Amino acid sequence: MNIDNDLRRIALQEQQLQFERFDLDTAWKLGVTLRRMAAERKLGCVIDITLFSMQVFYAALDGATPDNPNWVRRKRNTVFRLFKSSYATGLSLLKQQTNLQAKLGLADAEFAAHGGSFPIVVKGTGCIGAVTVSGLPQRDDHNLVVEALAELLGANHDELKLES
């Protein structure tokens, strides 16, 4: 893993994985896509889609733990605060050899700079929410979200995925 390469690729993901519009049907389709992918791969995780106004999708798959919803909340809070993926935030902080508390005064109990939460962006509007996965290693959480977004938006996942 090369942090600079990952940060460039995540910036590309965030630029390309944007919606023309996003409504509750879109949230459902995204959530079902994520759940299908996770179930087919037998991944124990929690999936959450939350807009700034309300939670619009939630699923927990076999193997999820009681800690996963709290991780979802903390990663989502990071996206809501910074309007970029929680993984990009974590990698940026790692590169700077700091953390959310030291850099921004954000408490670990409320925020997590770990992969798995990705901004839901509507073109011309901005970030309206976040889609979050928790339960896998953070890079895998992030990659699963990106893969589902790419499928739903018709983007080329091979061009967007993080290098192995």
Image: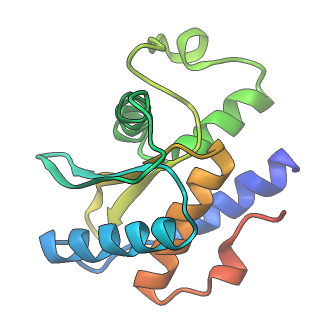
Q: Quadrant of residue 57?
A: bottom left
Q: Toward which corner of the image does residue 163 lie, by quadrant?
A: bottom right
Q: Tell me: 42 left or right of 33.
A: right
Q: Residue furthest right?
A: 2
Q: Is residue 123 visible from the viewing direction of this image?
A: no
Residue 92 seen in render: yes
Nearer to the camera, 38 or 106:
38
Camera-side residue of 107 and 140: 140
Estimate the x, y position of residue 7 in percent, counting from the top left: 72, 52
Q: Name the residue rendered at 51%, 79% in the picture.
A: 150
Quadrant of the rendering where the C terminus is positioned: bottom right
Residue 128: image x %, image y %?
25, 55
User: Horizontal placement of 154 versus 99: left or right?
Assistant: left
- On the image, the x and y values in percent for residue 133 come to 45, 50
Seen in the image, is 2 located left or right of residue 12? right
Could you tell me which residue is drawn at 38 percent across and 29 percent down? 66
**Residue 34 vertical placement versus 116 (above, below):** below
The coloring applied to the image is: rainbow
Q: Is residue 91 above or below residue 45?
A: above
Q: Residue at x 88, y 50 (%)?
A: 2
Instruction: Say whether residue 99 is left or right of residue 19.
Output: right
Q: Is residue 9 above or below residue 136?
A: below
Name the residue: 87% across, 50% down. 1
Seen from this angle, which residue lies furthest front? 62
**Percent coordinates x, y for residue 36 in the rendering:** 42, 74
